[in-house]
Amino acid sequence: MNGAMINGLPDFSIDSCKSIETRFKKQIRAVKRADRCASYIVSNPYSGQLHSRPSINFLEIGIPTPENLHFKTERKRPISIIHAPSNPLVKGSAEIEEALSSISSQYPEGTLQIHIGTMPNTEFMKKIAEADLVIDQLYTDTPLPGIATECATVGTPCLIFGYWKNYWSKYAGHIPKTVPHPGSVKEEILAFCQDPAPYKAEAQKLNRFVSQNWSPTQVTQKYISIIEDSETLSAVSPVAFDELFPAGMSQEKMEQFLAQSLEFGIDFKAMLRAARR
């Protein structure tokens, strides 16, 4: 369930829940049109439950990244940490900022350089190339979203968190990225500050992965293969996940919203099951 819809609600009143029901039904109709009209569907399997027909696993295709990538060189300086959310509510910025504030108080002044705030993409790409650590988001629905991919292109460690640990291996096992539980944000940042070596090693693996698998040429060829009816990319059944999972919000908040909606006679899980018939 998309936190972009839920996080902005003033409360979980009947009017708020019905407004989400209306948007949910509109989204179902849009997906049904795509299922009916599209020759092929490319979708993230972890947020594609509304499809009524199989789709191509987007994570096997990837996000196009520059070719001829070079891993960043090391230099001694204070630890530089960046959190530049495009949508603070969806990214879990309040919790991330709270963790960073707590951690920074434990280090001598000048030891950590923390930058929090939005910035143009060109500036962001320059910043992440110079940073030691980027913290992207707390509630991801993919093990390698856009910002994490951009960090991989320059070999900068990037922390993302999510609830999908038990599910990544099925459709994203080929991506060498660790996705910790959202409740461990402070512990993960502290672990990096104390011993960044494992995080840098993972960043180096991701750097090789995107350069070897997600270059513009390779991504283009994969789409051509789909058009040519190639079976090199596996199809994902829409019933692979029969539950609603949170993306962009906490598990607790989603469950609270679903329970309150059910009291008003709005059953989102039933709508999910009916959408695939």
Image: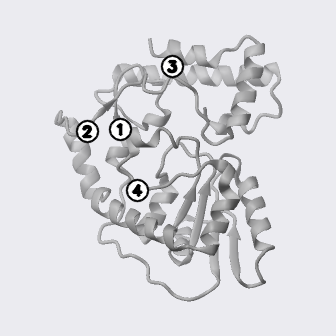
Q: Nearer the viewer, residue 24 or 184?
A: 184
Please report whichever mark, 4 or 3, sits nearer to the chain's N-terminal start: 3
Residue at the spot of label 2 = 233
**Callouts 1 and 2 close, C-beta under 8 Å:** yes
Task: Name the residue tied to disc 1.
Answer: 57
For the residue marked with disc 4, what is the amino acid? Answer: Pro
Q: First in sequence: mark 1 or mark 2?
A: 1
> Which mark sits nearer the N-terminus, 4 or 1?
1
Q: Nearer the viewer, mark 4 or mark 1?
A: 4
**Picture residue at 26% right of the left edge, 50% below the top:** 220
Q: CA distance from mark 1 to mark 2?
A: 7 Å
Q: For residue 29, which numbered disc appears in the image?
A: 3
Residue 202 sits above or below residue 72 on the image: above
Question: For the residue marked with disc 2, what is the amino acid?
Answer: Leu
How crowded pointer 2 is (Cα within 10 Å; few <14, some 14-19, many 20+) is rated as: some
Q: Amino acid at mark 1?
A: Asn
Which quarter of the picture shows residue 192?
A: bottom right
Element carrying mark 2: loop
* Residue 178 at x, y percent in the picture: 49, 55
